[in-house]
Amino acid sequence: MHTEEILRRTFAEISLDNLRDNVRALKGLVPKKFFFCPMIKSNGYGHGDIEVMQVLQEEGVTQVGVALVEEGIHLRQNGFRHVDILVFGITGQHGERSMIEHNLTPVISSFHQIKELASLVPKEKSPYGVHIKFNTGMNRLGFEADEVKKVTDMLKEYPHLEVKGVCSHLSDGEDASFLDGRSSVQFRIFQKIATHFPKNVGLHIHNSAGFLGSVATNDQCWGKSLNVSPHLKWGVRPGIALYGVYPSLSPQDLAQLEVQGVRLKPCMVLKSEVVKYHRLKRGQRVSYGGTWEAQRESVIGVVPIGYADGFGRNFSNKGQMLFRERRVPVVGTVCMDYVMIDLTEVLGDNFGSVGEEVVLFGKQGAAELSVDEVAKTADTIPYELLTCIGRRVPRQYVTGSI
Ligand SMILES: Cc1ncc(COP(=O)(O)O)c(C=O)c1O
């Protein structure tokens, strides 16, 4: 936990209790023997990797995923010695050496990675657990599907590498519930790949969308009914859902999840304050380039958050914030450290108090601006918004819901 004094009143308020509820809800959907690997890369999607890991550990999670070796080392150095940390990113020989040193689990995507790792594993750490990734349509990382025989042949040469898991990644997990979706093509390819590996190897392909889409499809109870298609029995790597943000599923899938009682709780509220007010005459302009011009006498509030904090320039003249539980527009260009809002509708020609709270996303009293909605106004997605909240924005952990 952060213990240093928080000076800045622009901060991300985070509820670890909500996170815990989400972990329980998601984990509860997965039968015990299934592979369950929450993704906590990029500082736990902006929520704080250590704090998130602590909750996961308390909830009995035994494996997590990161993108970088450095992210794995950070977890190890903060005392998480026993959890299995899967490193999904490709790294060079130097990174592989560090991975082994810190007992991180490589997710292998290339032949030379197999060879390098095999040459680096010391006797006392053999057999060293690895996961093998296949490309089934995302065309990012992973061996090609038609390389599976070559992969298994090569692995036979290196018995000190032990395949613990075989995985792939969905490019369109949102369509996992459709029989004719792109995911279904990936599922079929992955299913064939799986037949080349022993039955005890963990198979995992689902991200939040694939996972929850599949849960929505099977109203019996996910993975438990006998006639489910095989992909329902594959392990899951939920990321965004863990943090209480729904993936973009179809309205039917979302309704089905609701029926099944799956309710995710957002874990973060991004807050700031008004540090100064201005009264503008009609025709006066705001911020760099004067891209917003007052059409009437206006009251403008100055909010000390900017693109250096992850509140990007795309919000210029587009974004909204909550002030006194009402939506107010962002006016003018977003600066590095500041952004201005038009408070005329709420305050008339009065000023509010210095230090009055502003919410950039999340709840303020009865009002709410979801991170999803806010992301859309800047043509982005909640993932980007959450992971780009800057290091200089303090994370303030609160008990209870938010
Ligand atoms: C390999 C891998 N698995 C799982 C996830 C989790 O995805 P999501 O946050 O959509 O659940 C990601 C995230 O990008 C990923 O890269």
Image: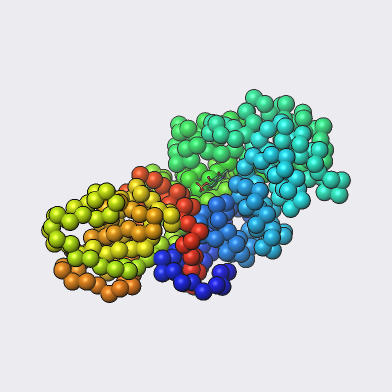
Q: Report if residue 89 is visible in the image.
A: yes
Tell me if residue 55 comes above or below residue 293 in the rendering. Answer: below
Residue 223 position, x and y percent, is 56, 47
Q: What residue is rendered at 80% in x and 41% in y?
A: 120
Tell me if residue 179 comes above or below residue 206 in the rendering. Answer: above
Number of dots carrying numbers? 0
Residue 323 position, x and y percent, is 28, 66
Residue reaching furthest right?
123
Tell me if residue 55 comes above or below residue 108 in the rendering. Answer: below
Residue 111 position, x and y percent, is 71, 31
Q: What residue is rendered at 60% in x and 47% in y?
A: 67
| Residue 51 in which image quadrant | bottom right
Q: What residue is rendered at 23% in x and 65% in y?
A: 278
Q: Report if residue 225 is visible in the image.
A: no
Identify the image quadrant of the C terminus.
bottom left
Identify the image quadrant of the N terminus.
bottom right
Residue 147 position, x and y percent, is 67, 26
Horizontal relation, residue 235 to residue 359: left or right: right
Horizontal relation, residue 84 to residue 175: left or right: right
For the residue pair 23 and 127, the one nearer the viewer reads as 127
Q: How is the image coloured?
A: rainbow
| Residue 364 in which image quadrant | bottom left
Q: What residue is rendered at 61% in x and 50% in y?
A: 66
